[in-house]
Amino acid sequence: MRISLFFKIFGLSLAVLGVSLGLGTLLLERSMLFETSRQIESDNILLVRELSRALALPLLKNDRLAIEDNIGVFEDTKGVLDIRVYDRNGNLAEDLSTHHRTETPQRKQSNFARVTENSEGITFTAIPSRRLFRLRAPVRFQRIPVGAVELSVSDSSYREVKRKILQTFLLLGGGSALLALAGSLFLAAFISRPVRDLRNATERLAKGDFTPVPPPLLADETSDLVLAFNRMAEGILHKDLLEKALVRYVSRDVAESLIGHPELIHLGGARQEAVILFCDIRNFTRLSSRLPPEEVVEVLNSYFDAFIDLVFKYRGSVNNIMGDGLMIVFGIPEYLPDHPELAVECALSMREAIEALSKERMEEGKPHVEFGFGLHVGSGILGNIGSRARMEYTIVGETVNLASRIEQEAAPGEILLSDHLWERIPERSRPKPSVSRTFLPKGLDQPIRIHVL
């Protein structure tokens, strides 16, 4: 079940407010009861003391008329509920009047909230459940106990103060609830706005929109969250641009492997085995000299578009575009055992694509070209090579140079494989060569054997 941020804040505010008012009322009521009890005790202890002295002789003589006269004085006294006089045996000798009585005459008392006794033996009892306070004093004649007098006082003063306090608390509670409502609306709006902006930005981010979220005017935790989201979106954008840039040069699976495992990129340079494939347009200088620059670029782009996807299909990387030729590497960022076989299959597919495109261009009356291919496998230095201003992640070494020399030896439409690469291909997967021959590459002392496809 979804609960809005406003109701959560408002509910929490009401809960805190209710607990605070409840605890405050309870504590204040207890404090008020205690203070009221002390005040009633202080106000009536003198009264009950004087009454006990006045009743000493009538109780000793058992003069009921004198006893009644002494307590009858308080019949209309405000707050006095009952006055009871007990003889020395604890029997009720007289009470004020029946219409003031709040309970049946009994000696046993219960539900005492607080019972105190002073040095004179006067006890004070608060009975909240019966809404009264009771003072009991012994009656002595020349220090001889002759009975007791009991004064019951109403707690109406306490209840009146309690009613006013409860009214005050209700007013405070109502006002606080309105303030909590207004504060919750303001706080929910203040918090939910950047949260909604983040939610909308997240939905846009899923659709490829990397527009940053404007931070709140006041710096707080929500602004920190917005700034963190913007940094995350910037990082995702950078990663997305990097992936888009990588897939222009390497296959998507290789790009994802590089992004997911950047440790595969040898920043400082490392020796690694790879299959190098060079392809180049034959007689390109003569073609470019008789065609306008626009048509030369159109020829190059049409052929490169025809087979670069094939390079990615066979898990190769377009490492360098050199005018009218390509340097393709199988083994970046890591070399796999089936790379020699994949490189040869890629070269064969590229030649088929070139032949089909050349035939189509001839039928349209457009210039066409032919390519030569050279492949070799061996170890090289893989890493970032260049200057501080311009670097390139590539592979260099004798293997690259020899692959380039083999490609220069290829006639139009020929695919030349070094004997070392030929031996790396499983016999069941080797294509049938048209011829095998040897040649002496520039810079080597011994001729090498090549296989022509």
Image (spheres, rainbow, N blue to C red):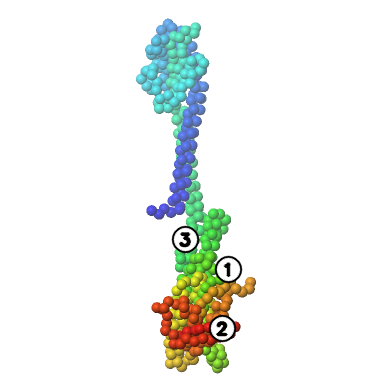
- Residue annotated with mark 2: 446
Mark in front: 3 vs 2? 2
Residue bearing mark 3: 199
Residue type pointed to by label 1: Leu
Q: Amino acid at mark 3?
A: Arg
**Is 125 placed above or below 180 here?**
above
Q: Which residue is farthest front?
A: 446
Distance CA(mark 3)–CA(mark 1): 38 Å
Task: Indicate the position of residue 128 as horizontal and vertical percent values.
Answer: 42, 27
- Above or below 339: residue 408: below
Is residue 207 visible to us here?
A: yes
- N-terminal label among 3 and 2: 3
Residue 26 in the image, given as x and y percentages of width and height: 46, 34
Give the spatial CA distance, label 3 vs label 2: 69 Å
Q: Amino acid at mark 2?
A: Gln
Given residues 345 and 216, the one toward you in this image is: 345
Instruction: Say which residue appears at 51% left-offset and 22% top-offset.
Output: 42
Residue 23 rendering spot, x and y as whole percentages: 47, 37
- The picture places residue 286, in percent across and down from the top left corner, at 55, 92
Q: Quadrant of residue 77?
A: top left
Marks 3 and 2 in Cβ contact (< 8 Å): no
Q: Which residue is mark 1?
A: 267
